[in-house]
Amino acid sequence: MPETVPTTPFDLDAYLKRIGWEGERRADLATLRGVHTAHTLSVPFENLDPVRGVAPPSTRPI
C-alpha cells in the first residue's frame, strides 16, 4: 500500500466538533472509548481519505 502524506495538517478541533465530542481530552481508556463511539455514530460509512488529504482512487496517478 502506498504511503500517503496529508496535504494539510489534521484539525483535531474540527474533527471532535464533527463527531460531537464534548468530553475532556485525556489520554485514557474512557476518552478513547468515548471518541471511538462518537466517531462510529456520526460518520459510520464515510470515507476518511478526503479528511487526510488523499485523492480518490480514480484520480490518483498511475
Image (tube, rainbow, N blue to C red):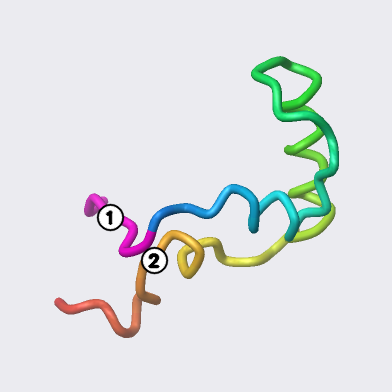
C-alpha separation, residue under disc 1 versus residue under disc 2: 9 Å
Three-letter code for the amino acid on which mark 2 is drawn: Gly
Q: Residue furthest top?
A: 28
Figure quadrant of residue 2: bottom left
- The amino acid type of the residue labelled 1 equals Thr
Across and down, in percent, residue 3 comes to 24, 50
Start and end of the magenta stretch? Answer: 1-8
Q: Main secondary structure of the magenta part?
A: loop
Mark 2 packing: few (<14 Cα in 10 Å), some, or many (20+)? some
Above or below, comparing residue 58 to residue 21 in the picture: below
Instruction: Name the residue located 74 percent from the left edge and 16 percent from the top edge.
Output: 29
Q: Name the residue under label 2.
A: 53
Residue at 50% from the left image edge and 64% from the top image edge: 51
As drawn, the label of residue 4 is 1
- Say whether residue 37 is magenta: no
| Total tally of numbered discs in the picture | 2
Quadrant where the C terminus is found in the figure: bottom left
